[in-house]
Amino acid sequence: MPKDDIKIDLDIFQILNEDGKIVNTKEMPQLKNDDIKRMYELMVLARVFDDTALKLQREGRMLTYASLQGQEAAQIGSALAFQKNDWFVPSYRENGVFITVNYPLDMLYQYWAGDERGMKIPDDINALPVAIPVGSQIPHAVGIAWANKLMGRDSVAVVYFGDGATSKGDFHEGANFAGVFQVPCVFICQNNQWAISVPFKKQTHAETVAQKAIAYGIEGVRVDGNDVFAVFKIVKDAVAKARAGKGPTLIECVTYRLQHHTTADDWTKYRTPEEVDMWKRKDPIARLKKYMEDEGIWNEAYEMQVLNDAKAKVSEATKKFESAEPPKPIDMFTNVYEELPPEIEEQRKDFE
Amino acid sequence: MPKDDIKIDLDIFQILNEDGKIVNTKEMPQLKNDDIKRMYELMVLARVFDDTALKLQREGRMLTYASLQGQEAAQIGSALAFQKNDWFVPSYRENGVFITVNYPLDMLYQYWAGDERGMKIPDDINALPVAIPVGSQIPHAVGIAWANKLMGRDSVAVVYFGDGATSKGDFHEGANFAGVFQVPCVFICQNNQWAISVPFKKQTHAETVAQKAIAYGIEGVRVDGNDVFAVFKIVKDAVAKARAGKGPTLIECVTYRLQHHTTADDWTKYRTPEEVDMWKRKDPIARLKKYMEDEGIWNEAYEMQVLNDAKAKVSEATKKFESAEPPKPIDMFTNVYEELPPEIEEQRKDFE
Amino acid sequence: MKMNLVQAIGLALTQEMENDPSVILLGEDIGEDGGVFRVTEGLWQQFGDNRVIDTPLAEVGIIATSIGLAIAGMKPIPEVQFDGFSLPMLDQIYNHAGRMRKRSQGKYHVPLVFRVPHGGGIRALEHHSESLEAFFTHIPGIKVVTPSGPYNAKGLLVSSIRDPDPVVFLEPKRIYRAIKEEVPEEEYTIPLNKAEIRQEGSDVTVIAWGAMQKIVKEAVEKLAGKYSVEILDLLTLYPVDRNTIIDSVKKTGRCVVVQEAPRTCGYGAELIATINDKALLSLEAPVQRVTGYDIPVPLPKLENYYIPDVTRINKAIEAAMSF
Amino acid sequence: MKMNLVQAIGLALTQEMENDPSVILLGEDIGEDGGVFRVTEGLWQQFGDNRVIDTPLAEVGIIATSIGLAIAGMKPIPEVQFDGFSLPMLDQIYNHAGRMRKRSQGKYHVPLVFRVPHGGGIRALEHHSESLEAFFTHIPGIKVVTPSGPYNAKGLLVSSIRDPDPVVFLEPKRIYRAIKEEVPEEEYTIPLNKAEIRQEGSDVTVIAWGAMQKIVKEAVEKLAGKYSVEILDLLTLYPVDRNTIIDSVKKTGRCVVVQEAPRTCGYGAELIATINDKALLSLEAPVQRVTGYDIPVPLPKLENYYIPDVTRINKAIEAAMSF
Ligand SMILES: Cc1ncc(C[n+]2csc(CCOP(=O)(O)OP(=O)(O)O)c2C)c(N)n1
Ligand SMILES: Cc1ncc(C[n+]2csc(CCOP(=O)(O)OP(=O)(O)O)c2C)c(N)n1
Ligand SMILES: [Mg+2]
Ligand SMILES: [Mg+2]
């Protein structure tokens, strides 16, 4: 009995093109003007937040920071597509998602300034803290989704990672578990074309991330990661599908990291200005702005207001985190165990 | 620009069917009668070797042993398809391959009786020793193939592993490296349907192993692992392709483990006799015999001779390994480093 | 009821699963098959697919999804099939299980119990005989427990399951079926910071854990009262019961540490350092270490020469006594 | 020429690559980018794609293909970007790199050098500040080396590359650029089993390795001659130069061990055990351990409170002297 061939569509799903035009009306999600404005405002806020972080870092007021510029649509579009009771599992580049789920901005700065207290996630946010080891958070999300399934909770886990992460065993083992146990997990790979200095074509001989889903018998989708409508639509569908018990999805958001990998990096060493410029022309924010202008829901006054608003929030956050009491050294001994073992108790005494 | 869809053929490539008939004349490799007899004789030898190991184990003369019964075509067919200067990288179930590359039978027994000296691979065999940690040998083979490429050697690495191994990060990271660096490596997965008690459908939600190749942008092929001609043909092509610098191939040999996982296992706990019987009817040896009979190159006298030959070899090996001097305890300190560090030198003295 | 270690662990698992619906088991072949050591035999039949879970063959997946499960409110008990295969899991244990509480500032914790068949002596294949406790005890944020017999196995496992922090539970596979003891059906727990004095004595302290307890007992029996030996059984390696160790060494002035793992940087070294810290002046002889050697565990034909045995232990006791 | 550690390591790599065409480098971002610490800067330009290889982001892949490369005749020098990411590699190091010679009965060996930026103190993110030498030194079949300055870094690295066994080369990232020394262009090697006496003394022995050497030096300077301190720099942790350690402790009778890693089961414990074995009677005070705590390395704001510093080292020296 001949089997069906496996097929996967490698086209990039797009709704809003580089010029701010809707190219796929059929798929355009039902969004009120206010929804669209919210998207825009969050994307601007993320950009301002990020710019300020880079500035603070240059001034020595922040430590290593990983910019999300260029990836705002992928992050905000996806973050708006899951619910409050869903889990969000980040890598280190997801400040746009954090911002969308209302994480206090000052705490994000605090964390990126090397103060662990910044990762005290508010009670009403179901998020894991930032994961630094690339890909390591993926199987955690699978475990969380699995717990949701086992406990009959109406909650999906959404995990974020980069193109580089797909090379790690953690991705492989996690995604395979997700397939086998059909857990409600949505895998969002922001393929920003680079893992520090390693371009995607040297990361894997596969042409796309999406096709890696085939290895796990799960659905894989490619979407224009700079198109907030497309990302929103695809993630929303995947989350709904997961929630309905119909299994996990691997989503490749094709996007670009406009800045250095982190503030410790210098992209001029390994990529051309032409390439970066080419992607700047696909900027997710400019594109949405163009669309909104055409739709009559954007004008200069609105822009000023959005920008001022964002700047006010960010400057308040800056003030707040910079005026926080420094952490108490002795607190490094807390939260290691529920009850401090005598070994550490002794070390703690010694420290005092 | 719309991309081509990715397609992979999930049909099982077959030449010799369950009834010993050639169903794919076009693909039938050019084999002389002597070649076919050699295949048959090696498969019988492997079966006798294996039966004897199981018997010795029951009698307490051998330790844990992993039977290859049912997988003779996959092992002998593939082993005949690479050359002496190629590398063979085994898991723990590849005695059929070891036998085909002329590994001394007594040393195989010696190894499986818990004597490390059995893995002193003869100088003229390019093989790694048995790898027990599932999947861990896969990236070693990739490294060896890579060295071959870097050094301009005309040598391919052929690595064997099971269906269970495909779930490991080592498989993923190794296969991805192979794709990226286009090394001359052939991946042979003997999908024998079970990883101890875990059936393939619980191992992964992917329908096949072959499709996992798509994740690495390399070629994937499914072949009837109980059809020695098909295996020979597919592996030969893949080895030639690798040798020609055209990249790695992942080959899924669809086969079956007829015996317990190892002598420490009891398959009646997790699978039905019906299933095992069904696969017995696909026995690779019986099938080849039928074909040879039809071709007039098999008869009872020949059978007796082949069997007696195999038994003689195996009984000689048994005698030889059982009459070997026991290993010297002090030798456990050799071959740990090229030069024994003082720490171990002291421990060694202490031991004496 | 008289039970061996396998049965006692099975009983603890059964009872805790009955008590607490969030307890689940995951590992390779632990379901229908009952586990390669038969520890989980019958549990899949009793609790079903959703609580006794055969996983794909993927150790990182097992431990890392367990971390996620634990964070989200389950009490996963992941199993690795043999100690030698736990090494790929160290990353997730070190970088995540032991740190999630810290990283989340106390919001999340990881109440999992990682079951590891531990050590050698069963004439098995390569990688089936490792003793990795020195790795685990060096990892902040986790506890390390190892029973030495059926009774304490049950009590320690129950405590481990109820512990809010990640626990590595090392099961000495060599004595899985070698010791039978009375093990109560009734619930009891053994605290995760107490060593036990197996035998009181005044001449020399012998410290061991896990499977080595049995060998130490045999060794001391063989001495037939020549010395008054105090035998300590650590049970929990981190946090370790330093008071009991120090009190004993202060009393006897001599000490022998028995460790199956390779010598250098083994757990025994930490015990010696602890004694150095707190009881140096009481020492009348160097602490003797009886250990595996700094070489891979040999295959079965030579394995017995590697693992500490009665002769080597008694040689060390003599050395301590005659120093 | 005056060089820092980064330059000295780069020079050793360059020269060995020039000498021996089988030497290749592999790791993340080590090519065109020159490595996140700039250690391999210029090497890709000089030696090209086939010898300075940017790999996919896959630590197991890096170490495990290196094992294969080494078996098949290359001399791979795999790099991990930060120590905290080396944990997934322990499996292949323990189960394969350290055992291939044994398993193949001497037919194969694994002459690789695994370069690991090591330890804390650079105000970096989580997992960028770990000290895992206690893991590596517990693994049979491998050597563990850690330089403390540019001069010895070059000599030790050359020796490591030429060594026929797998070497873990721990580079103290905190002093990558903190120390400049005269480093000859000419070839020289430093043997992989010799500690160095950095300063002779008669009151107390201070043992340290890697980045802690610099702090020890500062601490002792601060003491301004109050005690006559002998400073040992181990350079190679396995095999370690026990003779130099024992001779020194026998001479001084007092010892302080400085270790950046968490205290329990750290490498310092092994040193204490070694002293216990061979110089117990010479000890006039317990060996003092100055270590990191049994907690995850804190993020930068608190990191300095975690790492042994001048004050803590001098407190320990005082404790040893006043015992
Ligand atoms: C396991 C691991 N290895 C290496 C690193 C160092 N590192 C940090 S980010 C990064 C690149 C990640 O690339 P990608 O996954 O594409 O994510 P991106 O940074 O582009 O968002 C590397 C190598 C790490 N954090 N974790
Ligand atoms: C990393 C690792 N985990 C677990 C084991 C125990 N084990 C030995 S064989 C096996 C099943 C392997 O299945 P598969 O890869 O399909 O190979 P097969 O035995 O069927 O040939 C398991 C779980 C192991 N050897 N290595
Ligand atoms: Mg990326
Ligand atoms: Mg199998």
Image (spheres, coloured by chain):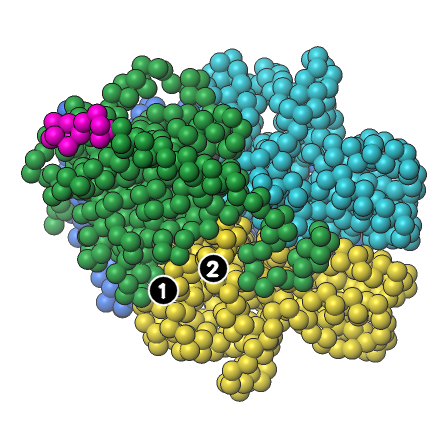
Chain colours: A green, B blue, C yellow, D cyan
Q: Is residue C3 left or right of residue B19?
A: right
Q: Nearer the viewer, residue B62 or A117?
A: A117
Which range of residues does the magenta coloring cover? Answer: A291-303
Q: Where is residue D79 in the image (x, y as percent from the top left)?
A: 54, 31
Residue at 55% across, 35% down = D124
Q: Where is residue B42 in the image (x, y as percent from the top left)?
A: 36, 46
Q: Nearer the viewer, residue C216 or B75?
A: C216
Q: Which amino acid does label 1 sit on?
A: Ile
Q: In this view, does B278 lie to the left or right of D24?
A: left
Residue at 60% across, 52% down = A331
Q: Can residue B261 be seen in this view?
A: no
Numbered circle sitting on residue C110: 2
Q: Residue A294 lies in magenta, yes or no? A: yes
As drawn, the residue found furthest toward the bottom would be: C1
Please state the chain letter of the residue tagged with numbered disc 1 in the rendered image: C
Q: What residue type is labelled 2?
A: Val
Q: Nearer the viewer, residue D263 or B325?
A: D263
Q: How crowded is mark 2: few (under 14 residues within 10 Å), some or many (20 or more)?
A: many
Q: Nearer the viewer, residue D294 or C158?
A: D294
Residue linked to disc 1: C53
Q: How crowded is mark 1: few (under 14 residues within 10 Å), some or many (20 or more)?
A: many
Residue at 60% across, 69% down = C192
